[in-house]
Image (cartoon, rainbow, N blue to C red):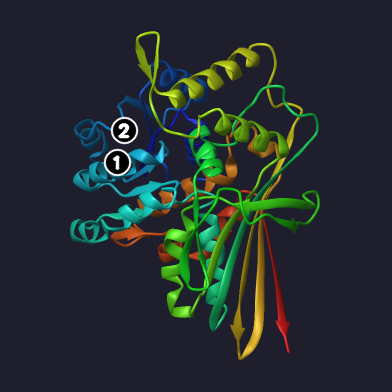
Amino acid sequence: MKIAVLGGTGIVGSGVVKDLLSEWSSGVSQVLIIGRNFKKLENLKQTLRDEKVSIEVADATDKLTLVRILRGIEACVNAAQYNVNLNVMEACLEAETPYLDLGGMYYTTLEQKKLHGRFVERGVPAILGMGSAPGSTNILAKYAADQLDSVEKVNIYDAIKVIGPESQVFVPPYSIRTLLEEYSAESVQFIDGELRKVPPCSGKEIVDFPPPFGKIECYYTLHSEIATLPYSLKAKGVKEVTWKLGQPDYIKKVAASLVAVGFGVVKKVRLNNMVIEPLDFLEALIQQNIEEHQKIKSVTSEEQSYEIIRVFVAGRKNNKETNYTIDLIKEPLKEYEGINDPMTSMPASIGAQMLARREIPPGVWAPEECIDTNKFFEEMIKRRFKIICSISTMF
């Protein structure tokens, strides 16, 4: 299988690359890493030291170059920022290369779904939002819904717990742009059978997770699950689909502070007769700070990071009220060393391999519409994730 990773030197993209090259993945003959910065591409290639790896310099907005590079590739993972999703999809469609991304922050996902007919016509499959959330969240919801005769509501939570001394260097858990948008933008939730806009970080709820997580405050943020699950589960009668995030206090404080000083607004700024994009500057500054401290010591060596995704699905089975609670847990295992954000990068790798094996039909799909839940669970368990399902029935 020949698989390309666009944005392959980034936080999640490099994790996808490493999973594709790992013992967990079989049948991968080539991993093409695409990025804008040749030095970063070459450094990653030298670090990996794997003959399967090749590199190409290209910008995600350069459709013609992407089409040329992607011809003959059997799956493309778009790990770049979601604002380029539509352009990369168009390139994959023209190159007839199966496509996968990590999400579109709701609104872009809605626009991407409109391309379904064209992808069917060309015989090209595409999976939207195949990371941890969206991605695993959608598949857990689908699994629970399949066990029920009808579904009343789906409540999704994603929480992180850091144990040990906090790093003195701020390392975003994922794209800083996405993080700041989650803390600054109105979110859309599906409540009482209709889509509603709610303020960022509203709907605060204390959720009691299993050890070592404990009780964590979770709150609404903008996310892509709400763009697809209300429709894919419509036949089950679903009336509520919500998403809430629970971050460590230090991440919340940094994100809130950055939003407060203006980094949550995507506007250019004039500085010393130059026009700059503040988020470009912030990304570069954060990365430079990380790299400078890595020269001295690891910036996260003393932290132990745990992550949990919980999907609660309430419905009816055999005319009885039945609830499913499914937890997907990532622990700080030695096997994950060197793999950035395995909770996101590994599902993306799994989905890309399904695309390359032609297990996904032509069209533009959300994960719950096209992924075999049992196969996905097998792959995640192989990678040592914990999946815990509990069922309660009211008689």
Looking at the rendered image, the quarter that the N terminus falls into is top left
- Number of the label disc, if any, that sits on residue 205: none
Quadrant in the rendering for residue 276: top left
At x 42%, y 42%, the residue is: 28
Q: Secondary structure at mark 1?
A: helix
Q: Which residue is mark 2?
A: 60
At x 22%, y 37%, the residue is: 67
Tag 2–tag 1 contact (CB < 8 Å) = yes
Decide if residue 343 is in sight here: yes
Separation of marks 2 and 1 at Cα, in angstroms: 6 Å
- Number of the label disc, if any, that sits on residue 88: 1
Q: Is residue 328 found left or right of 363 in the rendered image?
A: right
Count neighbours of disc 2 (C-alpha within 10 A) and say few if under 14, some if 14 to 19, many if 20 or more.
many
Decide if residue 374 is in sight here: no
Return the residue nearer the eye: 261 or 115: 261
Looking at the rendered image, the quarter that the C terminus falls into is bottom right
Q: Secondary structure at mark 2?
A: loop
Quadrant in the rendering for residue 303: top right
Tell which residue pokes out farthest to the top in this image: 272
Count neighbours of disc 1 (C-alpha within 10 A) and say few if under 14, some if 14 to 19, many if 20 or more.
many
Q: Three-letter amino acid code at disc 1?
A: Val
Q: Three-letter amino acid code at disc 2?
A: Ala
Which is nearer the N-term, disc 2 or disc 1? Answer: 2
Q: Can you give x and y, in whole percent of width and height, for residue 41 in the image?
A: 41, 22
